[in-house]
Amino acid sequence: MSNTVFALIDGNNFYVSCERLFNPALHDRPVVVLSNNDGCCVARSNEAKAMGIAMGTPYFRIRASFERAGGIALSSNYTLYADLSQRMMSVIGLYSDHQEIYSIDEAFIEWTGFSTLELGALATRLRQQVIRWTGIPVGIGIGHTKTLAKFANHLAKKHPDFKASGICNLAALETDALKDYLLETPTHAIWGIGRRWALRLAALGLHNAWDLREAASSRLRQETNVVVAKTALELRGTRCLSLERIPPPRQQIISSRSFGQLLTEPTPLRQAISTYTARAAEKLRRQASYTQSLTVFLHTPPFQERLPQYHPSVTVRLQEPTQDTLTLTQAALRGLKTIYRPGYHYQKAGVMLLELSSTQGQQRTLFEEQKVPSSRNREQLLGVMDLINREMGRETLWTASQGLALRERISEGWRMNRRHLSPAYTTRWDQLLTVQAS
């Protein structure tokens, strides 16, 4: 067995932990964080989980009973969560040169050459430092493969044997001890399987993680797919997945939101589409890509049958690949004009950037050289705009088609409903936490 191990560090109830960091009144109380437009529960404190509130539960269904029990619901504060995530990842990065940021609250790192005792001490020190420097409690799972590290992290947060310490090191276990934990774990709880494939595996007589681990690779490839077969190998300790220190560029970029209220007029729709296009273009530049086409779409509320239904979309092909916000906005607004129809109540709109390619090695058109100076000036302008918005807050600068004044843009009603939004404690001077002397 290789002396290289993976560790997965995962923030516990991350969104809730971020909120509790600045609001002590939330401690020891049921707390849920809600999705866009305060719709569904996307994060729950342990107290809320103990009440039986499931992930994705629509808040309106539980609101009365939840509030009677002293529960507190909060709108998603993505700016706060992203900033605290960056701080947490920076601390984790101090413990290894090999790090993969897997999600906003999860990161894999790689450790080589440490003994079992050293791994335990290292994980303990890492966990304590993350809590001390960021205030975010984390669970740590260690294994010889990424799948085993993910499984170990699950045990660290859920299993009575490890929950107190928040650390599970499967690399230190003998096969018989590991077998016991795998036998009590259903296949759907293993990373990469899920409930759909778990049903298929059950039909094959594979009901738990140990069954999957012991299944023949040839049979799994024949009866399932290569992902399931690799998962089984990873459970045996055979490395099939390596760290992705540089995330692969996206193949498409979608920017979409449900509106705070149903819209019928074209002006707020134009503002929304312009805003979503600007956000998508910023992501496009961040990954150093161009797009060759974009799709604009609208949705009416599908569950309000009394209203006429209309779900149009149109794809606009660009003359040449670009990452320019203004060019993309013009194309998106042309697409919106094509599909907009009066008389409908629109609930959602969005933009999807397609045919993405790297900015390196682009084929220029015959007349491209004539536009190079102005194109370079535009790139510099957008670069400065991105920098200001990154440093000073999203939409410090915006295009006129997004709405000429902040008051106008909010009053149009297309912005998300976030009635329970906490302050941006770490990214806005006017919302810094203050302490008053008694």
Image (tube, rainbow, N blue to C red):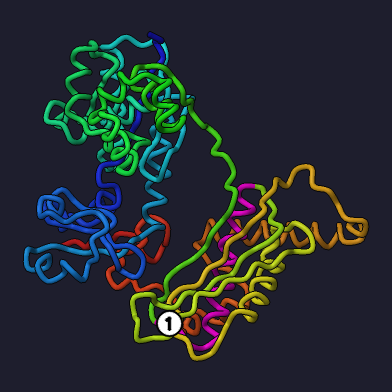
Asked whether the viewer can see residue 59, the reply is: yes
State the image coordinates of residue 122 (x, y, percent, origin top left).
31, 20
State the image coordinates of residue 56 (x, y, percent, origin top left).
27, 58
- From this view, report whether residue 10 is shown above or below residue 37: above
The image quarter containing residue 172 is top left
The residue under label 1 is: 413
The image quarter containing residue 4 is top left
Tell me the quarter of the image containing the C terminus. Answer: bottom left
- From this view, report whether residue 125 is shown above or below residue 258: above
**Within-10-Å neighbours for mark 1: few <14, some 14–19, many 20+:** some
The residue located at (22%, 57%) in the rendering is: 23
State the image coordinates of residue 75 (x, y, percent, origin top left).
30, 65
**Span shown in magenta:** 262-287
The residue located at (20%, 54%) in the rendering is: 54
Residue kind at label 1, given as amino acid type: Gly
Nearer-the-camera pick, 323 or 333 = 333
**The stretch drawn in magenta includes residue 50:** no
Q: Main secondary structure of the magenta part?
A: helix
**The stretch drawn in magenta includes residue 267:** yes
Nearer-the-camera pick, 104 or 406 = 104
The residue located at (12%, 54%) in the rendering is: 52
The residue located at (12%, 56%) in the rendering is: 29
